Amino acid sequence: MGGGSATGGPAAGATGARAAGRATGARAAGRATGAAGAAAGAGSRGTALGRTLRAPVSGRTWREFGYLLLSLPLSTAYFSLAITGLALGAGLLVTFLGVPVLAGVLLMCRGFGRIERARARGLLGASVAAPDPVRAGRGGAVGAMGALLGSGSAWRHTLYAVVHFPWAVFAFCLALVLWSCAWSLLLYPLWFWVFPAYTDQPGLQLFQNGDHTFHLDSPAEIALSFLAGLLLTSALPWVFRALTAVDRLLVAGLLGPSRLAHRVSELESDRGVVVDTAAADLRRIERDLHDGAQARLAALAMGLGLAKEKLQEDPQAAARMVDEAHGEVKLALKELRDLARGIHPAVLTDRGLDAALSSVASRCTVPVKVSVDLPERPAAAIEGIAYFTVSELLQNISKHAQAGRAGVDVWKSGDRLLIQVADDGRGGAGAGSGGTGLAGLAERLGAVDGVLVVDSPAGAGTTVTAELPWRTR
C-alpha cells in the first residue's frame, strides 16, 4: 500500500521524508546522548566505584546472605514434611485414606509457599503474587479434597518443597564458605597475632605434608592474604546475587500464579474494558443522535408542517420555510455523515487506512502529513482501531496542542502495526492528563494487546506511538 499525504505530494516523497526524519532524529538523539554521557561520565564512574566498595557491607548483600542461610533449615523442614506426607499418602491410597493425607500435604505446601513468598518479598524485594485460591466445585470435605488434588498451583508448591532442598544445601554451603573465607582473609592482619600468642604456631596453617607445613606468618604473606580477602569480599555481593536469582526464579515460577492463570486474568480485565468501551460508544452515539440529527429532524418536521398549512394562504412564506427546512436537511445529513465516519467510515472499508487517514487529516486544524507504508491491509478490527486511534490523536492536536504542523506515520514491523503521531505544539501531554483522552485510548489499545507510549516534554511537542498486533485479513 503506497504512502499518501493530506497536504499533497507523492507517496515516495512522503516515505522518503519519513525515513529522513527518522534518521535525523536518530542522529540528534545520538548527539544528545553522547553529550549527556560525556558530561556525566566522571561522576558516574565515581558513583559506580563507590557502589562497588560499599556493596560487601550494603543492606542488600546482608539480606541476601541472610536469605541463603535461612533457606537450609526451612527447606529441610519443607522437604522432610513433603516427602514424608507424599510417601504416606501414596502408601495409603489402597485404603482410600491416602486421599485426605495427600490433600493435607498439598494444603500444607501451599502454606509453605505463603511463607516463602513473604520471605522473598522481605529479604529479596521480589514481589510475587499469590496464586488463585482453590475453589471447590461442590461443598463439603470431599469437594475440598478434590479441588486440592486437581489444583495445579498446589502441586507446584509441593514440587517447590522437593526441588528447593538440594539447591538450598548447595547455596548455603557455597555462601557460608565464601563469606567465612573472604572476611577471615580480609581481617587476617588484625587477628593473626592470636596464633603465636595463644598457640604454638607462627600463623594460620594452610596445609601440612609430613614435616612440611605452610603458615601465613611473614608480612608479605599477610599482605597477600589481605588482598585475596579483599577480592573475595568484593565478589561476595555478585555471588549472592547470582544464587538468589535462582531462588527468585523458583519462587516466581512455582509459587506464583501460572502463565495461563495470569493470561486469563488479563483477558478478563480486557473484556471488561471492551464492554465498558462499547457501552460508552453506544451512549455517545445515542447522545449525538438525540442532540444532533434527531433534534434537527424534529424541527424539520415541524417546519414542513407549518409550511404546508401556509401553502395556500402565504405561498412566499411557505417557500421561505421550505428553504429553511432544506438547510436543516443538509445539516442533519452532515451530522449523520460525521457520526458514521466516527464509527467506521465507508472510505476505510473501501480503500483502507491510507485514504481514511488522509481524510481525517484533511479535517484537522493544522497541516498534517500522512504516510502509510503497509505491505497489505490488516484485519478489519485492527484497521478500525488504528483509524480510531489516529482520529482521536488528531482531535487532541486540534483542541489542545497549539501546534503548527503534525505528522502521521503507519508502518509494519515484524508482527506489530506501529502508528506514530507527532506535532510541534506545546507538549506536556500524558496518559493521565486531563482532557486529552489518552488514558482511555491506552485502555482501548491494551484490550487488544496494544501499547500506547507518550513522549511529550513541555514546550517541545508531542510524539505518541501506538503499537497493535498485526493480523492479516
Image (cartoon, helix red, strand yellow):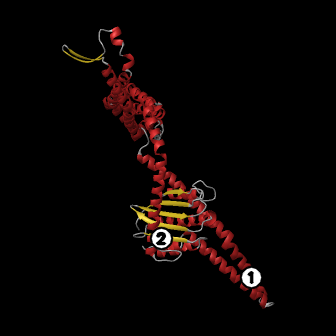
Label 2: how many Cα within 10 Å (few below 14, some 14–19, many 20+): many
- Residue at far left of view: 210
1 vs 2, front mark: 2
The kind of residue on which mark 1 rests is Gly
Give the mark nearer the N terminus: 1 vs 2.
1
The kind of residue on which mark 2 rests is Ser
Q: Is residue 324 visible?
A: yes
Residue 345 drawn at (x, y percent): 54, 73
Residue at the image position 44 percent from the left and 46 percent from the top? 261
Residue 161 drawn at (x, y percent): 37, 32
Residue 163 drawn at (x, y percent): 33, 33
Decide if residue 240 is on the left or right side of residue 317: left
Q: Which residue is the site of mark 1?
A: 305
Decide if residue 380 is on the left or right side of residue 275: left
Q: Which secondary structure lies at badge 2?
A: strand
State the image quarter where residue 55 is shown. Answer: top left
Question: From the image, which quarter does the N terminus lie in?
Answer: bottom left
Q: Which secondary structure lies at badge 1?
A: helix
Q: Is residue 84 visible?
A: no
Q: Which residue is the site of mark 2?
A: 371
